[in-house]
Image (tube, helix red, strand yellow):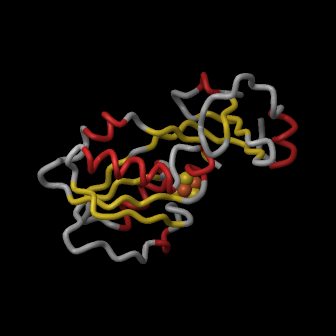
């Protein structure tokens, strides 16, 4: 699974236009939900905040995995011209490919590969992407994304053996 972080609200806002963009939000139900950067609650929060700031958000819906090419059977509202992607960068790229006539705006950035133990409610970054090397071995609360107080709940090797992910 991919560990991700939500972009700052101001960084999302600067990519959308209050006067011209008619927005739907598409959220992925998988990695970003587990990482706490996406999911239905975050979709609602983002939609409410944007609407209260005067943006034209029409609706939003969740898909099981935004990176699956055939998933996009959803019919957009007639006036919608902009998709806010509540998915990782692969999901956003897939949205761009699947809906080339729409403007697609990312709301989440990738950090790297993670392992997750939902019994312990912990995620651990095991293989960070370029630029996120300082995240190696860091732990976060599952479904929330807050930093754990210590990074020793999930030894990387132990989880790597379980999941088959190389250290
Ligand atoms: S779109 Fe990204 S977050 Fe969603 S399932 Fe695919 S890899 Fe995970």
The quarter of the rendering in which ligand 1 is drawn is bottom right
**Residue drawn at x 44%, y 53% as measured from the top left:** 43
Q: Quadrant of residue 26?
A: bottom left
- Of the 4 image quadrants, the one containing the C terminus is top right
**Residue drawn at x 39%, y 61% as measured from the top left:** 95
Q: Position of residue 163 (x, y in %)?
A: 81, 49
Question: Is residue 122 rendered to the left or right of residue 59?
Answer: right
Q: Position of residue 35 (x, y in %)?
A: 60, 44
**Residue drawn at x 47%, y 56% as measured from the top left:** 91
* 29 relative to 50, above or below: below
Looking at the image, the residue that sits furthest to the left is: 19
Foreground of the two, 112 or 120? 120
* 49 relative to 20, above or below: above
**Residue drawn at x 46%, y 58% as measured from the top left:** 27
* 164 relative to 103, above or below: above
How many marks on residues?
A: 0
Foreground of the two, 73 or 97? 73
Q: Quadrant of residue 126?
A: top right
Q: Position of residue 146 (x, y in %)?
A: 60, 33
Question: Is residue 129 rendered to the left or right of residue 153?
Answer: left
Q: Position of residue 131 (x, y in %)?
A: 51, 27
Question: Is residue 70 rendered to the left or right of residue 102?
Answer: right
């Amino acid at each position: 699974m991919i560990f991700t972080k939500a972009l700052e609200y101001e960084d999302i806002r600067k990519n959308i236009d209050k006067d011209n963009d008619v927005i739907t939000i598409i959220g992925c139900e998988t990695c970003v939900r587990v990482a706490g950067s996406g999911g239905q609650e975050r979709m609602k929060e983002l939609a409410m905040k944007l609407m209260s700031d005067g943006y034209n958000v029409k609706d939003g819906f969740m898909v099981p995995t935004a990176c699956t090419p055939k998933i996009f059977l959803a019919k957009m509202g007639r006036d919608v011209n902009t998709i806010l992607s509540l998915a990782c960068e692969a999901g956003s790229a897939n949205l761009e490919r699947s809906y080339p006539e729409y403007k697609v705006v990312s709301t989440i950035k990738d950090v790297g590969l993670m392992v997750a133990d939902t019994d312990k409610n912990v995620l651990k970054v095991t293989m960070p992407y370029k630029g996120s090397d300082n995240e190696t071995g860091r732990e976060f609360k599952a479904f929330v994304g807050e930093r754990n107080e210590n990074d020793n709940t999930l030894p990387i090797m132990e989880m790597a053996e379980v999941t088959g992910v190389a250290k």
